[in-house]
């Protein structure tokens, strides 16, 4: 058995059915309730006679602000819901494990490098095939891109998202469900969250249109099945790293590498419209998460994870829940 259950959470295994109800209630409250509350306040701002709130909505866009409302609801309600299924509180974030500090540091660096190699491969193929072309850039621009891409955006996003999604959500669900069930559910939500974007016209049509649009409208775009599959697969990879290593640091390294590389290469290169979209490499966005090439890289990383830790018998390699 590859999961170590601590005493405080072991009694939640018998409540796995009840935890489904708690989790479903939380999900619909956040997604629908957050959209209703955010949509109502945004519509008030758009229909007002000006002011700071209306200027803020116009500047950032109503869809982006709506997602902030849903995120706020998720954060505020998360402690209540997670405690129902065994979350241990502020000290239960997936930062610590039975591994030593040196091992955690090694995991972060190792998977950061592997993530960079995977993304460099995808972008190299894109450059060589002509999908993307280099922009003229100076050493100053390159250094600025590296600092902002990796040190600020990459590590920041990787740390925050891994703490919330894998460190808290996945590990809490794994206590009451099986590790694979928890990985699948949390990864589906992780993927879906990247498609939650209401259309501009929905804010003129009413609250019902806002809710529906925020949940499903983005799925009508081209190449969504491939992009959703890749985001889901990425979530599975990160969950498996947490499962095997017992903390989030390997997952943070891999996540930070992906986000950082995308940020840097997006500034250094641009899409060549003359080439057109190809499902094998993508091209609708600089992330290349809408092409089969990234799917292949993710599958390779998954095989590496399962092979690398397949015979690990030391307690430090197990998930400490």
Image (spheres, rainbow, N blue to C red):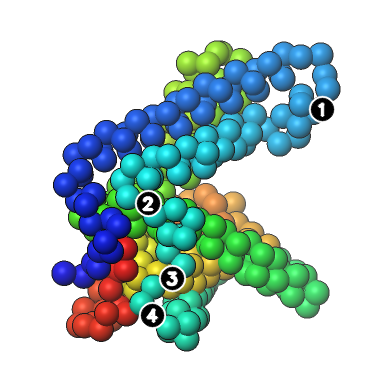
Tell me the element at label 1.
helix
| Residue for badge 4 | 99
Marks 2,3: beta carbons within 8 A: no
Residue 131 picture location, percent across and down: 53, 61
77 shown above or below 144: above
Residue 21 picture location, percent across and down: 27, 33
Residue 270 visible in image: yes
As drawn, which residue projects farthest toward the bottom? Answer: 102
| Residue for badge 2 | 87
CA gap, disc 2 to disc 3?
14 Å
Please report whichever mark, 1 or 2, sits nearer to the chain's N-terminal start.
1
Between marks 1 and 3 in the image, the one whose residue lies nearer the viewer: 3
Between marks 2 and 4 in the image, the one whose residue lies nearer the viewer: 2
CA gap, disc 2 to disc 4?
21 Å
CA gap, disc 4 to disc 3?
8 Å
Give the residue drawn at x 31%, y 45%.
85
CA gap, disc 1 to disc 3?
43 Å
- Which mark is on residue 96? 3
Please report whichever mark, 2 or 3, sits nearer to the chain's N-terminal start.
2
Mark 4 crowd level (few <14, some 14–19, many ≥20, 10 Å Cα): some
Please report whichever mark, 1 or 4, sits nearer to the chain's N-terminal start.
1
- Which mark is on residue 52? 1
């Amino acid at each position: 058995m590859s999961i170590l259950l601590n005493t405080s959470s072991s009694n939640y295994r018998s409540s796995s059915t009840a935890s489904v109800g708690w989790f479903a209630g939380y999900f619909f409250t956040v997604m629908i309730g957050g959209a209703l509350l955010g949509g109502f306040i945004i519509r008030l701002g758009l229909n007002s006679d000006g002011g700071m709130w209306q200027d803020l909505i116009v500047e950032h866009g109503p869809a982006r602000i709506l997602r902030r409302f849903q995120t706020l609801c998720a954060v505020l309600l998360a402690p209540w819901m997670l405690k129902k299924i065994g979350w241990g509180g502020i000290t239960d974030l997936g930062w610590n494990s039975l591994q030593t500090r040196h091992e955690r540091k090694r995991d972060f660096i190792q998977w950061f490098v592997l993530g960079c190699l995977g993304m460099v491969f995808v972008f190299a193929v894109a450059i060589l095939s002509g999908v993307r072309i280099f922009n003229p850039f100076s050493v100053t621009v390159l250094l600025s891109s590296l600092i902002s891409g990796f040190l600020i955006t990459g590590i920041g996003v990787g740390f925050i998202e891994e703490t919330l999604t894998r460190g808290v959500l996945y590990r809490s669900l794994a206590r009451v469900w099986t590790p694979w069930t928890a990985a699948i559910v949390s990864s589906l939500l992780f993927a879906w969250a990247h498609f939650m974007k209401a259309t501009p016209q929905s804010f003129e049509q009413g609250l019902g249109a806002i809710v529906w649009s925020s949940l499903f409208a983005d799925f009508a775009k081209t190449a969504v099945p491939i992009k959703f599959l890749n985001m889901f697969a990425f979530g599975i990879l990160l969950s498996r790293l947490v499962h095997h290593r017992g903390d989030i640091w390997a997952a943070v390294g891999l996540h930070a590498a992906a986000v950082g590389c995308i940020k840097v290469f997006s500034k250094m290169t641009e899409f060549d419209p003359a080439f057109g979209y190809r499902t094998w490499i993508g091209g609708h966005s600089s992330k290349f998460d809408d092409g089969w090439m990234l799917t292949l890289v993710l599958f390779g990383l998954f095989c590496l994870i399962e092979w690398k830790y397949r015979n690990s018998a030391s307690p430090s390699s197990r998930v400490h829940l």
